[in-house]
Image (cartoon, helix red, strand yellow):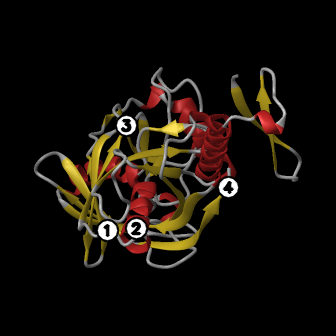
Amino acid sequence: MKTSIRADFGSGLGVCLLLAGSCWPSPSALRPEDIKQATSNFENLQKQLARKMKLPIFIADAFTARAFCGNPAAVCLLENELDEDMHQKIAREMNLSETAFIRKLHPTDNFAQSSCFGLRWFTPASEVPLCGHATLASAAVLFHKIKNMNSTLTFVTLSGELRARQAEDGIVLDLPLYPVYPQDFHEVEDLIKTAIGNTLVQDICYSPDTRKLLLRLSDTYNSRKTFPLVLPHLPAELFEQPAPWPVLQNLCGSAHAVLSSYWSQQLGKKEMHAFQCSQRGGELGISLRPDGRVDIRGGAAVVLEGTLTA
């Protein structure tokens, strides 16, 4: 006799379990092995439900030491594999610019003791190849909330291995440094006007690695010095479509992997400090390295922790 177990989910009434057999016998005719199999199936189902329905989740404000400042990101810890479409659903539910998912690379890994994890980032619309502030938020959760014992963490990502190490004044991220090149104004004139209207532009550069267009506004605009804008997620085909989010309002770590290259050329410096002039603010330290990468240093404040049921 073949025994199976099925779970039906009602509307708020819990789980109904139906035991089914090809020819279900009377209770007195049940064999011990049938009962054992049904019990095992039920226990496995309980484990699956518990595994899927309870995910530790945090929100951390990155590039700041104060709550409600900097750039917020959600961070989700994955004890087990998550269905692919669930990443996007959770990111859409959190409704922040990015939600980070930290996963174990091996069954024996431990969030408090292991030093290497997988890391992915999702906006409410799609997965992205790199996110600096959500990486900083992820490291802050592991260091400050999970009490990870290591001084340096490695994240395996779509942009290669990224490292985060504890420092006295925050967390230092080891990120790629993306070079920028002069961009012809006429090729992107329509896009610029759509983004910033008739604002005077002093310099235009393009980062082919990240598909970001950097606009440096005129230093004389509005009688005060202004700051560069970065238009993210531009298509490669000569920017034929507008960016989904035209101008960044919160401090973006990956954007500074581009800005660091530009301002190092302009100022002739390897060490810099950046401040985000926006409502939430934020600041970070920048150090260009001889190996062609950049260290970006910042703080983070964890403002929420709980359990996501999904």
User: Which amino acid type corresponds to the residue marked 3 in the rendered image?
Assistant: Leu
Residue 159, image x, y percentages: 33, 39
N-terminal label among 4 and 2: 2
Give the CA distance from mark 2 to mark 3: 20 Å
Q: Which label is found at residue 140?
A: 2
The circle drawn on residue 158 is: 3
Residue 72 drawn at (x, y percent): 54, 63
Badge 1 amino acid:
Ile
Do the numbered discs 1 and 2 sit on residues whose CB atoms are within 8 Å?
yes
- Helix, strand or loop status at disc 2: helix
Regarding mark 1 in the picture, which secondary structure is present there?
Answer: strand
**Image mark count:** 4
Q: Are marks 4 and 2 in contact (CB under 8 Å)?
A: no
Q: Secondary structure at mark 4?
A: loop
From the image, state whether disc 1 or disc 2 is nearer to you: 2
**Horizontal side of residue 195 vs 132, given as left or right:** right
Considering only order in the chain, which callout, 4 or 3, is on the residue closer to the N terminus?
3
The answer for how far apart the CA atoms under marks 4 and 2 are is 23 Å
Q: CA distance from mark 4 to mark 1?
A: 30 Å
Mark number displayed over residue 309 = 4
Report the residue marked by disc 1. Answer: 171
Residue 275 visible in the snapshot: no
State if disc 1 and disc 3 touch (CB < 8 Å): no
Give the left or right position of residue 245, taking residue 178 as reference. right
What amino acid is at disc 2?
Ala
Count neighbours of disc 1 (C-alpha within 10 A) and say few if under 14, some if 14 to 19, many if 20 or more. many
Closest to the camera, between mark 4 and mark 2, is 4
